[in-house]
Amino acid sequence: MKFEGSDQYIATADLMLAVNAARTLQRPLLVKGEPGTGKTMLAEEVAQALGIPLLQWHIKSTTKAQQGLYEYDAVSRLRDSQLAGIEGSEKVRNIENYIVKGVLWQAFEADQPVALLIDEIDKADIEFPNDLLREIDRMEFYVYETRQLIKARHRPLVFITSNNEKELPDAFLRRCFFHYIKFPEAETMQRIVDVHFPGLKKELLAAALKTFFEVRGLPGLKKKPSTSELLDWLKLLLAEDISAEALRSPDERVSIPPLVGALLKNEQDLTLFEKLVFMQRHNR
Ligand SMILES: Nc1ncnc2c1ncn2[C@@H]1O[C@H](COP(=O)(O)OP(=O)(O)O)[C@@H](O)[C@H]1O
Ligand SMILES: [Mg+2]
């Protein structure tokens, strides 16, 4: 079965091609793109479309590769050994009772194929991707404490996302199929908005998209507003019942849009935008 997008998620043709290519190659799909371009949602939607469970591993700066495999809970074992009576000591003696399975282990032992999302891999330290090479390649790992080899029963469909905060090592890249989600063009964006706000008035949508792409196009912005920010902004425009006319200045010049705080998230960008508006007003 091929992935063809869903009624919640607008996938461009090249994105669908990438998903299906990664499945054919049985390699992880590495998805990069600006924050808010639907990377995390892609994994959720593909899993749902294929009818398989999705296991998610959200990476933080402190996440270690080992945590995805398993952790040995020595603290609990020590506490149990201190508290245990005769009947409790059996539990303490068996180290298996203190091995906590990580997300990869859960994916490997699942009795049906699953999807596995390793989200925002670039948050972790530089060694993290390298530490997972073998596990991702061979789909197996060794548990030293219990001398067990854990092998995947079914190769999971792996999604790895990155916001590009760090470069990934070559050896890691070699093992992935890569896709960059380009920022949606106006037409695709319109379809995305349609999915979220099916009843939106045409004039309001057109005016809002025009303003949005003007703001995004401003040279020198520190943080360009993304899809999810546009959606937030539209939600506010609807809640406040703001009309299309209010977004357009009568002379078609750029003006500060209402509720701009949904789009621009720092004072430098706001100042930059105000300057542009000011300069246009004074025809300079
Ligand atoms: N192609 C798309 N189709 C539908 N909604 C989208 C799409 N891309 C982004 N969105 C919206 O933007 C939000 C943010 O997407 P998310 O997957 O969290 O982005 P990322 O993981 O790339 O930062 C989603 O919850 C969804 O509402
Ligand atoms: Mg995300």
Image (cartoon, rainbow, N blue to C red):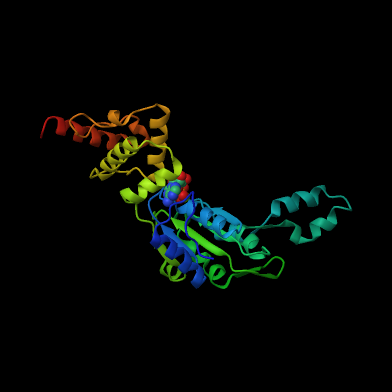
Residue located farthest toward the right when viewing the structure as drawn? 86
Where is residue 153 shown, x and y percent of the image? 65, 69
In the shown orientation, is residue 44 left or right of residue 254?
right
- Residue 185 placed where, x, y %? 32, 51
Q: Residue at x 67, y 63 (%)?
A: 110
Whether residue 188 is situated above or below residue 218 in the rendered picture: below
Q: Number of labelled discs?
A: 0
Question: Can the viewer see residue 254?
Answer: yes
User: Quarter holding the C terminus?
Assistant: top left
Q: Nearer the viewer, residue 247 or 225?
A: 247
Residue 66 visible at all = no
Q: Is residue 190 above or below residue 5?
A: above
- Relative to residue 276, is residue 43 drawn left or right? right
In which image quadrant can residue 259 be found? Answer: top left
Task: Looking at the picture, tell me which residue is in the foreground, 207 or 100.
Answer: 207
Q: Which residue is drawn at 47% across and 66% down?
A: 20
Of residues 236 and 99, the one drawn nearer to the viewer in this rendering: 236
Check the picture and name the quadrant holding the N terminus. bottom right
For residue 258, which quarter of the picture? Answer: top left
Q: In the rendering, at what x and y percent does residue 151 appear?
A: 65, 70
Q: In this view, does 140 lie to the left or right of 263?
A: right
Residue toward you, 107 or 43: 43
State the image coordinates of residue 176 (x, y, percent, origin top left): 46, 68
